[in-house]
Image (cartoon, coloured by chain):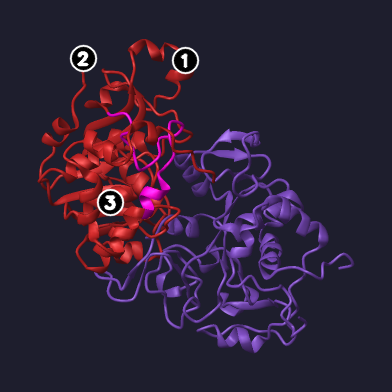
Chain colours: A purple, B red
Amino acid sequence: MSNAATEYTLAELCIVAAAEAFRHDGEVLATGIGVVPRLAASLAMKTFNPDLMMTDSEAYLLSEPNPLGARGDDFVQASETWMGFSRIFDNVWSGRRHAMLGPVQIDRFGQSNTSALGGTYQQPKVMMLGARGFPGNSISHPNSFFVPGHNRKVFVEGECDFVSSIGYNPQRLPKGRALADVDIRLIITDLCVMDFGGANHSMRLLSLHPGITTAQVLENTGFELEVADEVPVTAAPTAEQLAIIAALDPHNQRAYQIKDNPPGDRSGATG
Amino acid sequence: MDKQMTAAQVVAQLSDGMTIGIGGWGPRRKPMALVREILRSDLKDLTLVSYGGADVGMLCAAGKVKKLVFAFVSLDFIPLEPYFRQAREAGELEVMEIDEGMLLLGLRAAAWGIPFIPTEVGLGTDIITRNPQIKLVDSPYDDREWVAMPALKLDAALIHVDRADARGVCQIAGPDHYMDDWYARAADKTFVSCDELVDTEFFRDPAQARLVFWERAVTTGVVPIPGGAHPTSCSPLYGFDVPHFKAYAATAKAGGIGAYFDEYLGASEQEYQQNVGGLEAIRAIALPTY
């Protein structure tokens, strides 16, 4: 890591860590919903996986990711085909897609919730979006998650209040299918990177962000994690990666994605 | 055949308890003028099928909705639709919560006259456990189980388009026609409001005809209402009205839907448009950047 940057924000660290989710995907549609996932997918496409496909978040596929936010009247996006919402489903159901999304709850099975919290199903305490496309995404193609605030409200002790997406839950396994058919890739949070590569598809700690301890992660997770004896530190962004991210996000929307926009290295009062 | 009619004539063809599909997506190209005409009517007990936005929120808040078939209800930049949220949190709504793609499949099944379309979407999730009316079926060709997504047959579809002629040739000139063609085909009657009424000759240009997504026999009625999608967008003519949606959402915190209706709804679309600054102001709303 000779050219690792020393000054970077936590959001930038998460973008770089999340981009790794798309590294070996080949030619699939990379869908990052939200600023950090979108920048992660865009960074991957601009660097180590140029074969990725990406939409303009409206109705076209692009051969170059669009920068976020207002782009000026003379900006011409690099459209390559029409990709309206009905055609998105043709792509989703073919499996040639990897989405990175931010559900409100995730449980030990990797099931997630975007729909409702608390109360009863007929009368939830907090109604959110609804299941959206999560059921179809989760059974059709690989998915990753970004969680800007890693805590026990997100990583819940029991099952999600509403299961919007299929996970590695033997109780819910459809007839004729295997748990291995579910394909949840990386979970990037403000504390760490995880996956479901533990025993029996349990969640596993892959790396800790600089200055974060395993104990902090465990305290903020409502279920057990598989933790190796030595957990590596999440790789810092390179100067080149930071420059590409800055160009993709000229209005610095990334500064507003994690509470108080902390620095990427929290290993002490370095001022 | 001249299919022109007024919004009031459309609503006169609807009745209590009907299943009504509403085209568009979230805050984008919703037939809001037709929705407003329902809000002014005494229609009730409706079942709505929608990729929902303020269409769903307003109709729920006005007590028009018995049941909602949905995958989401959102204003996008305001993620949680405030009045839909209130209706759900009050326990008022009967719901059929499904995946976005399942909704598409349900409309296709209805359009094609088949009882269901098999899919793996929904397996392993609460879509199945919370919707006992959605059955799982065995395949005659493999050993897996599949979701039998039932046809979502609509009594009526309401859609807003950029342009139409009086015979029901409808053009969606924005970048996406969403699932509107499937709403149109899934319905017994399809009522379309349009921003511009054009002569049939307009479509002789193949580039214009290419933007027509269903054939005119599918269209029951055409209602010329310039600006009729406001406060949602009708790209490329106008974007969605961010300040208006913010004001709408604010009434959910203080004042209630009554305050919103008092300030904006009016007794007619003319009054509504005066209350929101007029057609020129609507057409001047910038398109969103995604």
Q: Determine the secondary structure under disc 3.
A: helix
Q: Nearer the viewer, residue B189 or B159?
A: B159
* Rendering coords of residue B245 (x, y %): 37, 51
A203 lies left or right of A156: right
- Dot 2 or dot 3: first in sequence order is 2
Residue A174 can be seen in this image? yes
Q: Are marks 1 and 2 on the same chain?
A: yes
Magenta span has A141? Answer: no
* Residue at point 33%, 59% (across, down): B250
Main SS of the magenta segment?
loop
Instruction: Pinpoint the chain carrying mark 2.
Output: B
Pointer 3 local density, CA inside 10 Å: few below 14, some 14–19, many at least 20: many
- CA gap between label 1 and label 3 equals 36 Å
Name the disc covering residue B218, or none: none
- CA gap between label 1 and label 2 equals 22 Å
Q: Are marks 1 and 3 on the same chain?
A: yes
Name the disc covering residue B206, or none: 1
Instruction: Pinpoint the chain carrying mark 1.
Output: B
Residue on which the image places disc 3: B56
Task: Between label 2 and label 3, give the one nearer the viewer.
Answer: 3
Kindly identify the amino acid type of the residue bearing the numbered disc 3: Val
Q: Quadrant of the N terminus of chain B?
A: top left
* Residue at point 16%, 52% (across, down): B64
* Rendering coords of residue A210 (x, y %): 73, 78
- CA gap between label 2 and label 3 equals 32 Å
- Where does the magenta region start and end? B225-246
The quarter of the picture where residue B91 lies is bottom left
Kindly identify the amino acid type of the residue bearing the numbered disc 2: Met
The quarter of the picture where residue A267 lies is bottom right
Q: Determine the secondary structure under disc 2.
A: loop
